[in-house]
Image (cartoon, grey):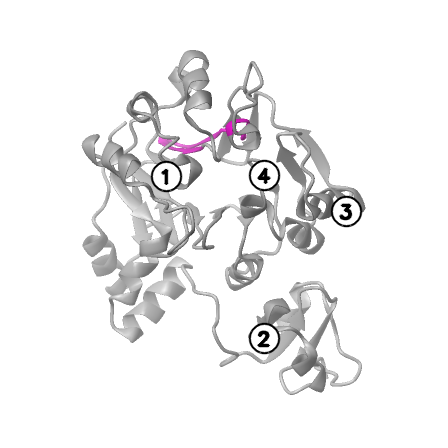
Amino acid sequence: MKRYLISISLIFLVLFSGILYATTLKAYFLNVGQGDSKLITVSTGEVVLIDSGPNENLILNTLQELRISHIDLLLASHPHTDHITGMDTIIDTYQPRAFVDIGIPHTTKTYEYLIRAIQKNNVKYYQATERKIRLGPLIFHILPPANPYLEISELNNNSAVIRLDYGKVSFLFPGDIESERESQLLKRSRNQLNVDILKVPHHCSFDASSIGFIQAVSPDVAIISCGEDNPYGYPHQETLQTLKDNGIKTYKTNRHGTILVQTDGVSYQVITEEDFLQLPEQAVQTSSQILGLVSVPTSNDGYQYAASKKSKVFHNMTCEHVTTIKEDNLIYFQSLEEAQKSGRRGCKQCKPEE
């Protein structure tokens, strides 16, 4: 499925001349290290998060930086910790309208915390059986689950495989499936595999992305989520070669940082964090503000308020309570309105609302 990709240089030219394309959907492939998380936002207000691990703090800060006030749909492709870490805190913070996963329990504390958060917040739960989900202009197709059930790499191969259609532009999010599940999909769902953008399965491992599967998907763009110097050696060279041999433009979070795909439903653009880092500082700030592609703050410069992600109270930056919050739990706010919109109240000691 070959569509016209607007060149990155043209995007920058348009942005810096003050003219902006009417972008409707933004899909962020977050640079979370050795894990996976995708955030999808639409200008009409819909917000979807697929997976959340393992860098919980980065994901929460990114949601905050992008002014996300709610989540409509939260999906977990499978319950490995590199895909669900922090999902309990995300549920506690945003109370998503619906949650979808494969319904296969796991023995980790991370999974236990997730289930507790769903129950505590009365989030509607749906199992990832074959179904279509319409959310505003978004159409999600959950492809048929493994049948028969795959015991080889159980959780990976039984991942939820999700297709997203927005207008004429399409995405495929196959979790961590491996070649055994790919073979099933080729037999049962081949006509639903052909998309524009593929999130490469299983972090670009050699045991996934078989030649037949890649040729059936036939994407223009492949995006790999993996951590720098990870212990598994991802991305594996064999799979990178398969993508190259099939003429697929490939991006990697461990090299390009967070990757943004934005589309109006007809054409789309791919913009990476690396692209911004190569620009002059002033240009980076300007384009980041326009596109909403942001980095998690590495200091508290410019922030007036702070809170713990585990607390419903926010503080002035100078409040002594801020110094007691663990760095991994710190969340910053640039304005009083932003702090209040997070659902937190002001500290009774430092009285930030006065």
Three-letter amino acid code at the position of disc 2: Ser
**Where is residue 268 shown, x and y percent of the image?**
31, 42
Kindly state the secondary structure of the residue where label 1 is placed: helix
Three-letter amino acid code at the position of disc 4: Ala
Q: Quadrant of residue 135?
A: top right
Three-letter amino acid code at the position of disc 3: Asn
**Tag on residue 335?**
2
Kindly state the secondary structure of the residue where label 3 is placed: loop
Asked if the residue under mark 1 is in contact with the one under mark 3, i.e. CB atoms within 8 Å, the reply is no
| Residue at x 70% of width, y 34% of height | 125
Kindly state the secondary structure of the residue where label 2 is placed: loop
Q: Is residue 83 visible?
A: yes
Q: Which residue is mark 3?
A: 121
Distance between mark 2 and mark 3 Cα atoms: 28 Å
- Residue 170 lies in the magenta stretch: yes
Give, as a single range, the part of the protein colored magenta.
157-173
Image quadrant in which the C terminus is located:
bottom right
Of 112 and 30, which appears nearest the observer? 112
Tell me which numbered mark, 3 or 4, is placed earlier along the sequence. Answer: 4
Q: Is residue 48 visible?
A: no
| Residue at x 26% of width, y 34% of height | 243
Q: Which residue is mark 1?
A: 204
Tell me which numbered mark, 2 or 4, is placed earlier along the sequence. Answer: 4
